[in-house]
Amino acid sequence: MGQSQDEDPLISIIVPVKNSARTVRDLMDSLMKLDYDRDKLEIIVVDGRSSDGTRKIVSDYPVLLVDEEGRGLNAARNTGIRWSTGQIIAYTDGDCVVPPDWAHAIVKNFRDPSVSFVGGLVRGYDPEGFLSNYMDETFFNAKPVFRWRREETNLSLLNFPAGCNMAFKRSALDKVNYFDERIDYGFDDLDPVEKLCSRGFKIVLDPEVSVYHQHRTSLREMLRQHFKYGRGGTLLIIAKRASKLAGWFTSYLITSTFAISAEIFLIFFGIWLKSWWPIWLGVNFAAIIFAILMTFYIETAFRTRSLSKLILYPALDVARGIFFTLGGIAQLFKELGRKTRQNL
């Protein structure tokens, strides 16, 4: 490690939870097994008004349990900061499990005084679950994927770290005014990281800093989650129009809305005309998109000896994309309605 445990910094681990009774005990058990000096470790669980027994489970452990001040995940993250005293602020979620060396792996990167942020990998907790494997193997992964440690001052879209496995130097987080509580549902965790990058702070992506995530276990839960991500994308556009992430989501929302609208138009236009050619055109367009998606999974299907992934994985990609788009559109109409009522 380069330094003794006596020189290890105080690390504050903040865990926002809400109705996490099904998974939070696994997380708490793993946090109790961290190989880090207990006198230099504080665990703060911020509860967002749970109604399913989450608080009772958390209260069984020697951690600080506090109420969320405000509403939303970013409000919970900021609440945790106000209660914390650590030089390093680390975050994970109530549906994760951390390995014993997690805290040490984070701290090792902060030995370099120029590092302001550390992000890591997120792996599926259930290697036997089909959806869990899909979320780990999809080409359009919602979590960062990298094999080697990297030091960056500018991140590409697909390498933005996940909120369930990230850590900030406290002084750096102070300089970007914490988390923007106007953003919720999705993209909420990325804003301070983008601010750090834009101001030239050094960030580290380290695959040795990893957590295990209990991915959604049903198709309904997964699609509902991506619908919420889409809602978060629209809130990001409204709150942060000039940001790189907002620009990406704007482009995505326009493109995907056009593609979905074109498909629907061709089908209904063909029905109205009582003609097959518009329907044939729409079906062929969809088939081309699907075939392109299939090419991304040829290697995965043969490596895992599961040819069904050639069909199921692209189908899940399409379903996620549709619900992601619908969530963005739904939130956009909600915000327009709110502004209309305010102007009346």
Image: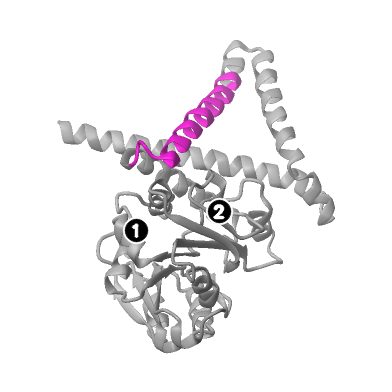
Q: Quadrant of the C terminus?
A: top left
- Secondary element under disc 2, as helix, strand or loop, is helix
Q: Is residue 325 above or below residue 281?
A: below
Query: In the rendered structure, does residue 284 fall within the stretch colored magenta?
Result: no
Q: Is residue 331 left or right of residue 106?
A: left
Mark 2 vs mark 1, CA separation in Å: 21 Å
Q: Which residue is mark 2?
A: 222
Q: Residue placed farthest to the left in the image?
A: 344
Q: Which residue is mark 1?
A: 74
Could you tell me residue 243's position as x and y percent?
39, 40
Please give the range of residues in magenta. 240-267
Q: Is any atom of residue 60 visible in this view?
A: no
Could you tell me residue 179's position as x and y percent?
33, 56
- Secondary element under disc 1, as helix, strand or loop, is helix
Q: Is residue 292 above or below residue 88?
A: above
State the residue in front, 42 or 271: 42
State the residue in front, 105 or 33: 105
State the residue in front, 206 or 157: 206
Q: Amino acid at mark 2?
A: Met
Give the mark nearest the N terminus, 2 or 1. Answer: 1
Q: Quadrant of residue 144?
A: bottom right
Q: Amino acid at mark 1?
A: Asn
Q: Is any atom of residue 68 visible in this view?
A: yes
Q: Nearer the viewer, mark 2 or mark 1?
A: 1
State the residue in front, 40 or 219: 40
Could you tell me residue 102's position as x and y percent?
54, 75
Secondary structure character of the magenta stretch overall: helix
Q: Quadrant of residue 128?
A: bottom right
Q: How many marks?
A: 2
Q: Please tell me how crowded label 2 is: few (under 14), some (14-19), or many (20+) other residues with Cα within 10 Å.
A: some
